[in-house]
Amino acid sequence: MGTYVPNTPEEQREMLAVCGMTDLEQLYDCIPEDVRLRKPLAIPAAASEYEVTRQVAALAGKNHVFSTCLRGAGAYRHYIPAIVTEVTGKEEFRTAYTPYQAEISQGVLQSIFEYQTDIAELTGMAVSNAGVYDGATAAAEACEMCCDRKRTAVLVSSTVDPKVLSVIRTYRFGRDAEVRLVPDVDGVTDLEALKEMLTDDVACLVLQQPNFYGCLEDADAAAALVHEAKAKLIMSCNPVALAVIKTPGECGADIAVGEGQPLGLPLGFGGPYLGFMATDEKLMRKLPGRIVGQTEDRNGERCYVLTLQAREQHIRREKASSNICSNEALCALTASVYLAAMGPQGLAQVANACRDKAHYLKDRLTEAGLKPVFDRPFFHEFVTAAPDEDAAEKILARLAEEDILGGLALGNGRILWCATEVVSKAELDKTAALVKEVLA
């Protein structure tokens, strides 16, 4: 940015003259003097590109990247084919935004259209938007889609990722609306309790599949109960799991949401990630953000346009149904390239490998002395219990000494483990051996 000059001193004087001012300080006359900053900011002096690069590299060096990762809980380490970064690294794609007028950028619009097609097919839903900020935001926005004047309460299963629940609560707090937790039993949503909680003021239920504990929910039964109460079902899904389990569309969900990070996006220290949203035709016009459509130009050639975008999101402010006016275009492109590279069979192979290795890890950890907490079908995450909290802490610490990031500590000696296709049998055996060593 050192060579970027937004305007010259002469241009600044011309603009001030139009405003009837003589200097920049007059722009701030409305700000009380006692809150103005009258001294330089406490930031380092300017440095050369080489100096800054070395300093940033030193800071990044403080981060530790484990060679073996057995932790998931919403962010997962998968293999990313080289073609993905080769395509997304092209200069013409290195943007996270859609230009205005959007139609002049046919390449970006086509990439978004392909992404929408992929997500609709993956979720079994009719239509997808261009993506939102992350999976938690997608779930919260989906709740807003379902609520109206009479139905304002939102039910969230207690087996939903706590981070997702937190964002939903933040959204609903702004609407002064209630979020009610549906209890769980043996690692899944308590359907009997759900039936009692589906009152006339309930707009929707948020159900995670697989859930935060890795267990597979009975989504079909939940959908039947929700629809009988004239509410809507929002399913938050792992996109890789959708290659081998029933899709939200097949389960009867009204909206499918989730985190797109497993689709070609590497683990980062906080992102950037990608929230996907898909729904049926009845709710299509309530989708936040943007939708790209395909049409023909005056010469009969195929082209793409930005369509079904509610302009109220830009101009009505607090009265808008959503304030999302953008999308994660580069992350969505990454997901599209990953899905194209893997294909349906490749994605299913990844999912099956994740499932098989997770089940193998569970068996080995059980042999090592950890007790499975839930006896239910699961995908690639599961919960074990150590004899006590101290034992769980020692297990995770011992694994870290061997450059293994163990599962996520849930408290009371419980650990949430995850295995994906990138971990080897040798790594899983080593983990089990270390656990056995600690417990012995």
Image (cartoon, grey):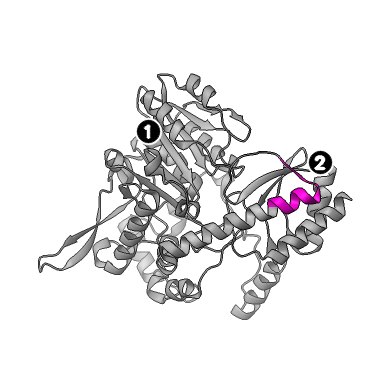
Magenta-drawn segment: 362-372
Q: Nearer the viewer, mark 1 or mark 2?
A: 2
Residue placed farthest to the right in the image?
A: 440
Query: Which one is in front, 136 or 43?
Result: 136
Q: Magenta segment: does it hold 286?
A: no
For disc 1, the marked residue is 146
For disc 2, the marked residue is 389
- Residue visible at 32% across and 46% down? 314
Kindly state the secondary structure of the residue where label 1 is placed. helix
Kindly state the secondary structure of the residue where label 2 is placed. helix
From where the camera sits, is residue 57 visible?
A: yes
- Residue visible at 40% across and 19% down? 200
Q: Is residue 424 left or right of residue 122?
A: right
Q: Which labelled disc corresponds to residue 51?
A: none
Q: How many marks?
A: 2
What whole-number distance in Å separates the C-alpha atoms at marks 1 and 2?
A: 41 Å
Percent from the top left, x then y, of residue 368? Answer: 80, 51
Main SS category, magenta section? helix
